[in-house]
């Protein structure tokens, strides 16, 4: 089977350093054409973010990915609000860390040096440690409920 996206890790996980967090973690070496739109969207969102941060807007024009950037930001806030409102106190802190881009078990091991976050994940109905990767995962039921909540945002 052809690799979907071939990534090469180029730095260690960020731990709790927010500057390192936004440096590239992987270099993309290969993309299956079936997943090309994922890379196009990620690159486009990054470009729109840079355009916005440089504050060089031309009157009457916008970056092609800026509407998607706004939608994704709104959906992300909604996802975080949903995650907090639908979980207990033990899950909330863990979910917020996961949503802060610490979605690898190694990252959480470093953040929770003196706490057993893995026990919290095992006792959770919503969070699971991947059995085939180091990704921290959400249950399909929780993710689908969050998606429904995001799609029902009032405009």
Image (spheres, rainbow, N blue to C red):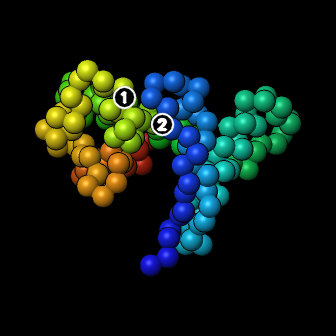
Regarding mark 2 in the picture, which secondary structure is present there? loop
| Camera-side residue of 21 and 126 | 21
Asked if 144 appears above or below 104 in the picture, the reply is below
Real-space Cα separation, disc 2 to disc 1, in angstroms: 9 Å
Please tell me how crowded label 1 is: few (under 14), some (14-19), or many (20+) other residues with Cα within 10 Å.
some
Total residue callouts: 2
Does residue 119 appear left or right of residue 85 in this picture? left
State the image coordinates of residue 116 (x, y, percent, origin top left).
21, 28
- For marks 2 and 1, the one nearer the N-term is 2
Does residue 32 appear left or right of residue 63 in this picture? left
User: In the rendering, which numbered label is found on residue 110?
Assistant: 1
| Camera-side residue of 39 and 133 | 133
Regarding mark 1 in the picture, which secondary structure is present there? helix
Q: Residue at x 34, y 40 (%)?
A: 105
Picture quadrant where residue 125 is located: top left
Please tell me how crowded label 2 is: few (under 14), some (14-19), or many (20+) other residues with Cα within 10 Å.
some
User: Furthest residue to the bottom?
Assistant: 1
Circles 2 and 1, Cβ within 8 Å, touching? The answer is: yes
The residue at which mark 2 appears reads as: 13
Q: Residue at x 70, y 42 (%)?
A: 48
Q: Residue at x 35, y 48 (%)?
A: 134
Res. 19 visible in picture: yes
């Amino acid at each position: 089977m052809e690799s979907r996206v071939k990534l090469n890790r180029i730095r260690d996980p960020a731990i709790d350093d927010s500057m390192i967090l936004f440096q590239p973690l992987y270099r993309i070496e290969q993309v299956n054409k079936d997943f090309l739109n994922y890379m196009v969207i990620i690159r486009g969102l990054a470009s729109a973010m840079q355009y916005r941060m440089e504050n060089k807007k031309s009157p009457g024009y916008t970056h092609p990915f800026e509407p998607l950037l706004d939608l994704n930001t709104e959906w992300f806030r909604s996802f975080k609000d949903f995650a907090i409102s639908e979980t207990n106190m033990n899950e909330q802190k863990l979910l917020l860390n996961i949503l802060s881009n610490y979605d690898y078990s190694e990252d959480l091991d470093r953040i929770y040096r003196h706490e057993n976050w893995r026990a919290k994940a095992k006792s959770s109905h919503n969070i699971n440690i991947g059995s085939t990767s180091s990704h921290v995962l959400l249950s399909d039921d929780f993710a689908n409920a969050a998606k429904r909540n995001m799609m029902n945002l009032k405009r």
